[in-house]
């Protein structure tokens, strides 16, 4: 991997630097050539791009250098490629492309420390590459470079040179408008039901007749549908208004969160994510959305129109990714399930009993909790009772006993004969979420179906049984971020084949791997088993079982 940085403009401040992070593709030397062409393109259009060739000839602390570049850069460009994604998600060999792994870790740390830094990290897809080469944790909003020309890289160049395509016009002076009363003797003329293209002035005289799409009629407020938006958004709002037959707007379009909003007199709301179609949302649905924690920046907007009877509304465009509004007794947000190779706790939280081979699930549950919540004696009594009938208990044996150091924010129980371990950690200075780890020590040559079974049971225990001693119903609790479950396997002994994944065909399993599932807390047994199988299949493909498929586990 090579690291470069570019400074936007001669004599620019250090904070305007752009650090380019990419991986060498061993089987595709043309990829590095493409990165060099990108560097040349930046220079040719006014960006003083610099390669680190001069630094490469000198001895230096490269880890420190890369850390400084990423921390001080105004933008970090991540060049998408299979090798970059593989190593950034921890699926490559530890001895290969260490610089990629180091830089990706720094980028992740910056992102998870403050998600507002997302705008600084820019995934770039060069010609011949795909959005599928972008690491999962960077999301789906990418900057494609279709050709090494101004036209082919226009969107990226506009970003780096701070030249947006659409510029908000300056505010002008307010007009001096005198109050005016409508004549009480002049009746308001109504349009016939079959005519939608007449417009009248205040005296009632016909001033224009045209086709339906030829004009937009202002409402009593004098504001038209789409007014106040950029041309593209304005057209989307006008089209949605005509299609839905909405009444009059109560005010102009305004930017909110990830998109644009306009309210109408009939209690309907028009909204649109940037660059997407406008949709109509009934007033009661919009009220439920507005009551969600994190609305709208985190939850996003509806992707399809929703009337007042809608019970489930799909959302997207927010920092939390794709999700759903559930209009139950208490409206709540939940994520749409998806996989990610970005595992955090699996490689940070120590294994309780590292003996031979560990299979575990680590749930991160950002629930809305009281600030003074503690693990009390009563909490431990409820936890001990709940563990006796937990799903994981069916896969282990013996009694659950307190283990490790017990505090008001950390509780651990081990099942010695199993052996198994459960740990509950309340929010602290490092995390604002409940963390629950459920692990089982298995024997070598554990099969793929057995791993799925243990993951499924550990997942259920970690997301419902254990947190259930703190909140009455974890499934319906308000979320402050997407809940995740990291499904983790690790071996400690030098077994030649610690995991028997022969169900997937030919391949060579690694010593450790983890997959993160973003999913609703209340997944039932079949749903958890389905996604555990998807996770193991994804992990197997990363280990070289190229033809692995979920159907192999049936």
Image (cartoon, helix red, strand yellow):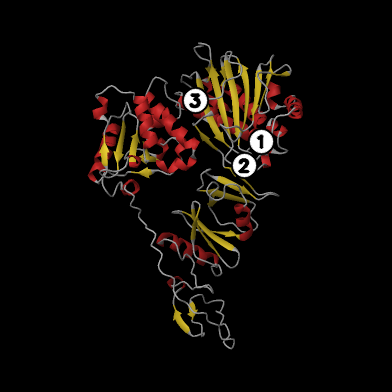
Mark 3 or 1 closer to N-term?
Answer: 1
Task: Report which residue position mark 1 lands on.
Answer: 524
Task: Report which residue position mark 2 lands on.
Answer: 479
For mark 1, give the secondary structure: loop
Residue farthest toward the bottom in the current orientation of the protein: 185
Q: How far apart are marks 3 and 2 (CA)?
A: 32 Å
Label 1: few (<14), some or many (≥20) within 10 Å?
A: few
Classify residue 463 by image quadrant. Answer: top right
> Is disc 2 in contact with disc 1, using a CB cutoff of under 8 Å?
no
User: Which percent across, then down, holds residue 292?
Assistant: 61, 49
Residue 498 at least partly seen: yes
Residue 550 at least partly seen: no
Q: Which of 448 and 175 is in front in this view?
A: 175
Q: How far apart are marks 3 and 1 (CA)?
A: 24 Å
Q: How far apart are marks 2 and 1 (CA)?
A: 19 Å
Q: Which of 265 and 192 is in front in this view?
A: 265
| Disc number for residue 407 | none
Q: Which residue is drawn at 31% across and 23% down?
A: 60
Task: Report which residue position mark 3 lands on.
Answer: 540
User: Which percent across, then down, holds residue 316?
Assistant: 52, 48
Mark 2 or 1: in front is 2
Mark 2 or 1 closer to N-term?
Answer: 2
Mark 3 or 2 closer to N-term?
Answer: 2
User: Which percent across, then down, holds residue 454?
Assistant: 62, 24
For mark 3, give the secondary structure: helix
Q: Residue at x 26, y 33 (%)?
A: 51
Mark 3 or 2: in front is 2
Q: Quadrant of the N terminus?
A: top left
Q: Which residue is drawn at 57% across and 33% down?
A: 431
């Amino acid at each position: 991997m090579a690291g470069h940085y570019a400074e936007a403009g001669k004599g620019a401040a250090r904070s305007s630097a752009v650090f380019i992070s990419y991986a060498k593709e061993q089987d595709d030397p043309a990829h590095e050539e493409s990165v060099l062409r990108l560097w040349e393109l930046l220079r040719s259009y006014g960006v003083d791009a610099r390669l680190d060739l001069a630094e490469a000839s000198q001895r230096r602390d490269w880890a420190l250098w890369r850390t400084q570049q990423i921390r001080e850069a105004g933008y970090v460009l991540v060049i998408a490629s299979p090798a970059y994604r593989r190593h950034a998600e921890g699926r490559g060999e530890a001895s290969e492309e260490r610089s990629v792994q180091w830089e990706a870790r720094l980028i992740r740390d910056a992102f998870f420390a403050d998600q507002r830094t997302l705008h600084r990290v820019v995934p770039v897809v060069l010609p011949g590459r795909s959005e599928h080469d972008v690491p999962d944790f960077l999301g789906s909003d990418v900057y494609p470079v279709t050709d090494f020309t101004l036209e082919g890289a226009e969107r990226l160049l506009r970003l780096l040179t701070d030249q947006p395509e659409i510029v908000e016009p300056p505010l002008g002076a307010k007009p001096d408008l005198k109050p005016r009363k409508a004549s009480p003797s002049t009746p308001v003329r109504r349009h016939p039901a079959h005519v939608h293209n007449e417009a009248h002035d205040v005296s009632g005289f016909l001033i224009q007749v045209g086709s339906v799409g030829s004009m937009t009629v202002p409402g009593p407020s004098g504001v038209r549908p789409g007014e106040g938006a950029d041309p593209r958004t304005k057209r989307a709002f006008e089209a949605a208004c005509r299609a839905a037959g909405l009444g009059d707007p109560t005010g102009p379009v305004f930017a909110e969160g990830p998109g644009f909003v306009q309210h109408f007199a009939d209690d309907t709301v028009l909204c649109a994510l940037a660059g997407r179609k406008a949709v109509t949302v009934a007033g009661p649905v919009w009220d439920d959305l507005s009551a969600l924690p994190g609305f709208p920046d985190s939850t996003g907007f509806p992707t399809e129109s929703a009337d007042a009877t809608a019970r489930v509304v799909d959302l997207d465009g927010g920092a939390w990714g794709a999700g759903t509004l559930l209009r139950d007794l208490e409206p709540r947000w939940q994520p749409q399930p998806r996989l990610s190779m970005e595992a955090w706790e699996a490689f940070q939280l120590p294994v309780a009993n590292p003996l031979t081979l560990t299979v575990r699930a680590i749930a991160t549950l950002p629930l809305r909790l009281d600030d003074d919540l503690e693990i009390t004696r009563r909490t431990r009594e409820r936890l001990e009772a709940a563990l006796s009938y937990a799903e994981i208990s069916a896969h282990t044996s013996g009694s659950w006993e307190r283990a490790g150091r017990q505090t008001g924010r950390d509780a651990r129980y081990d099942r010695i004969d199993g052996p198994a371990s459960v740990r509950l950690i309340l929010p602290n200075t490092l995390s604002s979420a409940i963390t629950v780890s459920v692990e089982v020590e298995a024997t070598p040559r554990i099969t793929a179906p057995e791993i799925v079974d243990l993951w499924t049971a550990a997942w259920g225990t970690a997301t419902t049984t254990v947190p259930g001693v703190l909140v009455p119903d974890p499934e319906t609790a308000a979320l402050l971020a997407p809940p995740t479950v990291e499904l983790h396997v690790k071996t400690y002994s030098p077994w030649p084949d610690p995991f028997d994944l022969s169900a997937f065909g030919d391949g060579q399993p690694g010593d450790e791997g983890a997959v993160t599932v973003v999913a609703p807390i209340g997944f039932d047994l079949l749903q958890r088993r389905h996604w555990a199988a998807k996770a193991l299949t994804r992990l197997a493909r990363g280990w070289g079982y190229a033809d692995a498929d979920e159907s192999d586990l049936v």
